[in-house]
Image (cartoon, rainbow, N blue to C red):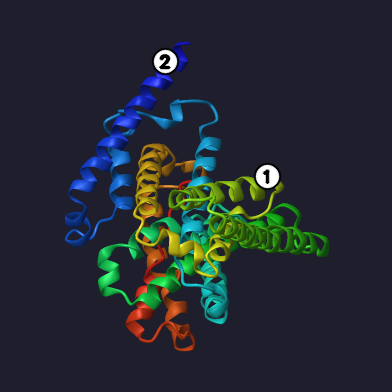
Amino acid sequence: MMSIQIWATDAGLAYICLGGFVVAFSMVSVFTRNLLYLNEVVLSTAFGVIVGPYVAGVFDPRSWMKNADIITLEVTRIVLAITLFSIGVELPRSYTIDRAKCLLLIIVPTMIVGWLIVGGLIKALFPMLNFLSCLTIASCLTPTDPIMCAAIVGSEFAKVYIPVHLRQLILAESALNDGLAYLFLSFSIYMAVDGPSKTDIGSWVLIGGLYQIILGLLIGAMTGFIFSRLMKFSHKKGLVDRESYVIQYLATAIFIAGFVGTIGSDDLLAAFAAGSTISWDGHYNSHLEGDLLPSVINMVLKCSYFIYVGAWIPFESFNVPSLGISTWRLVTLCACLLVLRRIPIIMMLYKWIPEISTWKEALFTGHFGARISWV
């Protein structure tokens, strides 16, 4: 009973912090976004660190229960699924098919080269780890983060100064490579655990490629298509109102994440595929046009999630002498990632990518490697 009371008190304090932050941010959002160039992701993470156990100690998510890591993982899955679904909905009709060649050209080489570069950097900075372990970690650092991408690219500043075709490309890339990163993760794990045998490579192709990626995409696309047809039928019969389209916005993303995750396929790619197909003919988007509620929901979700992440970050793990982990090595790794992970390969490839027309756009796209990898 005492533990329940302690948890309830901590949860109440967390709600106070969340509500207070959202109220304060909404009052000065134009100033912070357009003059300080800071969005809700950066500010809410910093606020979470301040109110977390290492500074003010207002609440500590890790003390709530024994399975805090599992809960963090599930919260992250839901927030990512909703974000990826929203990206799929907001992109132009049939964008992924029309720009398939362009997306493949920017995603595949960038991820492969970035994966190897990051693995090499980790090996150089943490020599106690073997290279396959470094590649496993690198697979989590290689893709861009769709939550941060959506927050930055969707800002009013970005809409004024960044061409629309570049914003759409960055959003689509972040949505796709976040799910495709599982291929690199599963490959690294297979090689680290069992070694490079034909059986293990075949299992990786079958499970990692076909079952995880392809099946997840197919289920997401089919679900989005079916839900779109059902909503059109309901609208034609007068059974659905405008508010129900917003409900579908959340419910479909959660349904996809739960269903595809339960069968063990890639729920992130499935959520993006569902968002892309549910808005394929423009019917779904037309009923959300001008409705600010999805944007409000996304902002509150981002603020909630990143305040939680800021308070959850295990700063004590930044120094682990037995693994050669120290703060200066992590800072050095972060700086090297910003410079070397994406910029060189994008600068070499941009002339073959129609959506990137100048070296300045290529530099921006390469630098835009926003990534959060706490979980």
How crowded pointer 1 is (Cα within 10 Å; few <14, some 14-19, many 20+) is rated as few
Answer with left or right where residue 144 lies relative to residue 116. left
Name which quarter of the figure residue 190 lies in. bottom right
Q: Residue at x 31, y 37 (%)?
A: 18
Which residue is nearer to you in this view: 301 or 195?
301
Which residue is nearer to you in this view: 45 or 276?
276
The reply to whether residue 143 is visible in this rendering is: no
Q: Residue at x 66, y 57 (%)?
A: 186
Helix, strand or loop under label 2: helix
Q: Are marks 2 and 1 in contact (CB under 8 Å)?
A: no
Which residue corresponds to mark 2?
5
Answer with left or right where residue 322 lies relative to residue 149. right
Residue 10, horizontal then vertical, whole percent: 37, 24
Q: Residue at x 35, y 74 (%)?
A: 364
Helix, strand or loop under label 1: helix
Q: Residue farthest to the right? A: 199
How crowded pointer 2 is (Cα within 10 Å; few <14, some 14-19, many 20+) is rated as few
Residue 26, horizontal then vertical, whole percent: 23, 47
Q: Residue farthest to the bottom? A: 351
Amino acid carrying label 2: it is Gln
Against 353, is 89 above or below? above
Question: Between marks 2 and 1, how big is the CA–CA gap?
Answer: 32 Å
Residue 242, horizontal then vertical, whole percent: 44, 53
Q: Residue at x 35, y 28 (%)?
A: 59
Residue 8, horizontal then vertical, whole percent: 41, 21
Which residue corresponds to mark 1?
262
Q: Which numbered dot is residue 108?
A: none
Amino acid carrying label 1: it is Thr
- Sequence-wise, the earlier of marks 2 and 1 is 2
Name which quarter of the figure residue 340 lies in. bottom left
Name which quarter of the figure residue 266 lies in. bottom right
Q: Residue farthest to the front? A: 237
